Amino acid sequence: EDKVVQSPLSLVVHEGDTVTLNCSYEVTNFRSLLWYKQEKKAPTFLFMLTSSGIEKKSGRLSSILDKKELFSILNITATQTGDSAVYLCAGQGGSEKLVFGKGTKLTVNP
Amino acid sequence: GAVVSQHPSRVICKSGTSVKIECRSLDFQATTMFWYRQFPKQSLMLMATSNEGSKATYEQGVEKDKFLINHASLTLSTLTVTSAHPEDSSFYICSGVHSGGAHEQFFGPGTRLTVL
């Protein structure tokens, strides 16, 4: 059975801190690993990773995939209160279905 | 990015009634749409895969006669919760896969269903 595990489940930091969110996966016919940010409504897309070792960046956020270790991390530098959200990792297999992890709830305090 | 809309955004109904939720891809064609359910403080759980012009594929444990899915066109899929019960109260989210894109899923804003 396909599985995505995120850690930590919850994280509280102060503004300006750097955080690393972890995601491990076991997905049949793996195609890609996706990161989403979810605030009060539906998830918003952050990154799609398909190749190992290539870092994707968007502002203060970056992510990288290790297909050998079946692992991905999402980094957020210089965190801001607006980064507070649940960050979801999802594995996509051959059928295009996404298998989501339980998410990491990030709280950034001023 | 591509836009997916859902209607209604929020619905409250009585137990035993049926509720229809629409999912539309506004600026792209989606041969495949997915329906998810999210309970409070939990992750998204895939309910079913909706393919245009064919029957939906349901995940294990999801009753196909209770959650009716119709994908009548490349831009519209509907989910009907039949004979709703309070335990069906949840946040329902759809997503569409861009037919010509990189298999990225675009999510709708979600529908909050409350069954009294």
Image: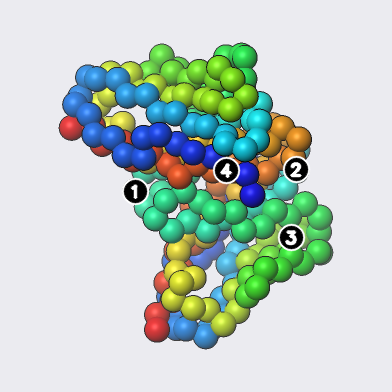
Say whether disc 2 or disc 1 marks the residue closer to the N-terminus.
1
Which residue corresponds to mark 4? B3
Q: Residues within 10 Å of mark 1 (few under 14, many from 20)?
A: few
Residue depicted at 31% across the width and 39% down the height: B10
Which residue corresponds to mark 2? B102
Which residue corresponds to mark 3? A65
Q: Are marks 1 and 3 on the same chain?
A: no
Callout in the foreground (2, 3): 2
Residue type at mark 1?
Pro
Chain where mark 1 sits: B
Chain where mark 2 sits: B
Which residue is the extreme one toward the front? Answer: B27
Which residue corresponds to mark 1? B40
Chain where mark 3 sits: A
Quick check: B115 above or below A45? above
Residue type at mark 3?
Leu
Structural distance between the alpha carbons of marks 1 and 3: 29 Å
- Element type where label 2 sits in the image: loop
